[in-house]
Amino acid sequence: MRETYEELRERMVREQLEARGITDPRVLAAMRKVPRHHFVPRRHRAFAYDDCALPIWFGATISQPLMVAMMAELLRIEGGEKTLEIGAGSGYQAAILCELGANLITVERVPRLAAIAQNNLRRHGYDARVLCADGSIGLPEEAPFDRILFTASPPKMPKAYEDQLAPGGRIVGPVGSRAVQELVLVEKTPDGRVLRREYGGCQFLPLVGEQGWDEKELSNYRWEE
C-alpha cells in the first residue's frame, strides 16, 4: 500500500532529521506539520519528502529537508523575532519559520515566484509579508532584524546583512564560490562584535544582486522557465 503524505512526512522527520542530529523539538514539530508537497510542482509531489532538493519554478529550488531544518535550528526562533528571509522560493522555508513564531518578511527577486510564495503562505494561514526586491542588500527600510536567513549563496557575507542585524541577533546562510560553499552562522553580541562559525559544506543556487553575484557572471544559469 502506498504511504500517505502524512506517513512520508513522519518518516522524513525520523530518518532524515532526527537520525542526523536535528534535536530541537519545535523545529521537528514544524517539519512534521508543514506539508512540503504543497510547495512543489505537481509533477514532483511524489518526491516531496525525499532526501534532496527539488526544482520548483523559474529556475529555483526547494531545499533539502535536512538543510531547511538545520538552518531553522541554527536560527533559534523562539517566537516574535523580527525576521528577514532572503529567497522566498515557493514559501516552504518561510512556512517553517512562521510555524516557529517568526515575525517574518521574506524577499524574492523573481516576481512570479514571489506571487507563488505569497499564495502558498496565505493558503496555509501564515501571515508573512512577501516582497519582490534585490535581497542581497537586505531590507534597510525595515532594519534592524533579530534574525536573517538567506537561501541563496553570495561569494562573501553581504555587509548589508551584518549592518541590519540587531545586537543579540543571528544570521544563517550559505557563503562561498559556485563550487564550494559553507553554511555560516553569524552572531552579533550585545556590544556589537560579530562572531562567525561554519557548519559544513552545502550547495545552493547563487545569490544575485548588488552584494551577491553579478548576473552577467552567471550567463550559463537560466532563471526563467
Image (tube, rainbow, N blue to C red):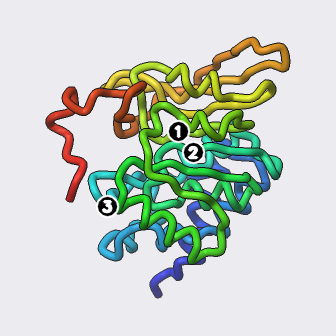
Callout 2 touching callout 1 (CB < 8 Å)? yes
Which of disc 1 and disc 2 is earlier in sequence?
2
Classify 10 Å Cα crowding around label 2: few (below 14), some (14-19), many (20 and above).
many
User: Mark 3 highlights which residue?
Assistant: 57
Mark 2, residue position: 85
Cβ atoms at labels 3 and 1 below 8 Å apart: no
Q: Is residue 210 left or right of residue 169?
A: left
Q: Amino acid at mark 3?
A: Trp
Amino acid beneath label 2:
Glu
CA distance separating discs 3 and 1 = 18 Å
Q: Residue at x 63, y 22 (%)?
A: 163
Q: Residue type at mark 1?
A: Phe
Q: Residue at 70%, 37% (x, y): give it.
A: 145
Q: Nearer the viewer, residue 155 or 167?
A: 167
How far apart marks 2 and 3 lie (CA) works out to 18 Å
Residue placed most toward the observer, 45 or 104: 104
Check disc 2 and report its element: helix, strand or loop.
strand
Q: Position of residue 154 (x, y in %)?
A: 41, 27
